[in-house]
Image: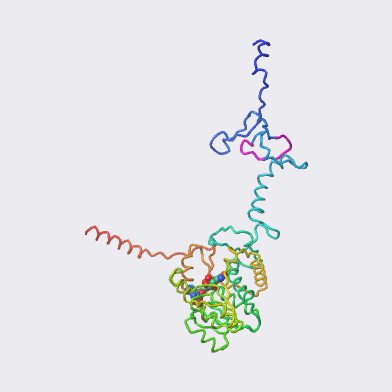
Amino acid sequence: MSTEEQKESPEAAAPAPREVKCVVLTGFGGPKMVRCQKKPEPSAKEGEIGDRVIGFCDYKAWSEVVAIPSQFVYKMPENMSFQDGAALPMSYLTAYILLFDIANLRQGQSIGDRVIGFCDYKAWSEVVAIPSQFVYKMPENMSFQDGAALPMSYLTAYILLFDIANLRQGQSVFTHSVGGGVGIAVTQLCHMMEDVKLFGTASYQKHEAVKANVDHLFDHVVDYPQEVRKLSPEGVDIFLDCLCGEDANKGISLLKPMGKYILYGSSSIVTGETKSFFSFAKSWWQVDKISPIKLYDENKTIAGFQLRHLLHKQGQHQYVKEIMNKLIKLYSDGKIRPCIDSAWAFEDVGEAMQKMQDRKNIGKIILDPTLEPKPKPVSPARTHTTSQCSEDKENTEDQQ
Ligand SMILES: NC(=O)c1ccc[n+]([C@@H]2O[C@H](COP(=O)([O-])OP(=O)(O)OC[C@H]3O[C@@H](n4cnc5c(N)ncnc54)[C@H](OP(=O)(O)O)[C@@H]3O)[C@@H](O)[C@H]2O)c1
């Protein structure tokens, strides 16, 4: 081609495209498929800039020159090296969002803290995600099992006694299920005050273990209002009811003037393995419908308490946190100590729940994901018999 011809050809006039080094994944596979290759230099389109910047590319980032839309580009400070600029955005942005926006990490908290938390649901899991407003730092001297046993029972007992009932020296308290988690918490908190008289019920087989915790203990099946009246004709100042049904009427009738009845559970609804609609309806039906005018005439107060609703539906986490802090201090000072009946591996949850169902626990039953399941008895003879039975049955069916 002559010089004249070269001048006229447009391809000859355009400068050769600059090439830049890129790291490219050349095919399916691991690092061996990653190559350093030369690629045409990308040109900046409208809205793309050239400066000392940090940027996020969607793809094609492993190149000497990249084109990035300006909304993904951030100007580097003077004192930042290019290597720091390359290392910072992805890792620090991810960490920042996880900690401060998602986990809502606040002053006083740090990664690796031993904590207690309240889940609304899905708590029976090795790993749980809990919003930070429902999480409380554990004191150094608290075991994980105590941490699991404390919050629900002691928060409930504390709020019932001190915030709702306003328990004072010289008063009397009646509580059901004194061998249960909440019952034990109620008795321990009452003992922190001088001259508080405690009445309670528990199944007869627990009496030996818990009788020292209360002044007067009855089996739930006896006519306990009558027994209490024999000892305290005026009745009691505070009645804590976790049973509901006809026990609600008994509790309200046992109140002294200015007395307080608080409903915080409905165990009487559980008659078999689950809550039954029939026993729920029966329990609802059995409770006397009390008019405020009757309460006004008799100087009595009726209240209710539901921790789960308070925390997860009514947004009172700040109030609960304040009480939790007081309880953690009481624990650290050795004034309260959760009672743990037994701890179980996740695999043994059925057995643990059966114990609860049979009302055999004294204190809390804990599920501990670090525990190994109990060895299960193997009974080859029984297995043989079963299969033998099936074989026999099949043979009989074949013959018919
Ligand atoms: N409102 C709240 O925020 C809140 C918070 C925590 C607990 N609670 C309620 O408080 C109650 C006790 O809780 P907890 O944590 O102390 O339980 P727990 O440690 O498992 O104790 C349960 C005890 O309740 C007694 N009980 C009475 N009637 C029962 C029945 N029909 N079925 C099974 N057990 C029965 C049994 O003791 P005896 O056989 O000795 O009577 C049983 O051992 C429950 O109703 C629970 O729902 C309410």
Q: Is 80 situated above or below 64?
A: below
Left or right of 128 on screen, residue 395:
left
The number of numbered badges drawn on the structure is 0
Give the image location of residue 184, x and y in percent.
57, 76
Give the image location of residue 206, x and y in percent.
51, 79
Quarter placement of the N terminus:
top right
Q: Is 287 situated above or below 72?
A: below
Left or right of 183 on screen, residue 5:
right
Give the image location of residue 194, x and y in percent.
66, 82
Residue plotted at (53% across, 36% down): 28
Q: Is 330 situated above or below 74?
A: below
Q: Is 340 situated above or below 33?
A: below
Residue plotted at (67% across, 40% down): 71
Rendered image quadrant of residue 394: bottom left
Name the residue at the right extreme. Answer: 78
Quarter placement of the C terminus:
bottom left
Left or right of 255 on screen, residue 88:
right
Give the image location of residue 66, x and y in percent.
66, 34
Q: What colouring method underlies this structural image? A: rainbow
Magenta stretch containing residue 51, yes or no? yes
Magenta stretch containing residue 102, yes or no? no
Name the residue at the front extreme. Answer: 293
Rendered image quadrant of residue 151: bottom right
**Looking at this view, is 223 or 248 the one in front?**
248
Left or right of 386 on screen, residue 292:
right
Q: Is residue 234 visible?
A: yes
Rendered image quadrant of residue 297: bottom right
Stretch of the chain drawn in magenta: 49-61
Q: Is residue 341 visible?
A: no
Magenta part mainly helix, strand or loop? Answer: loop
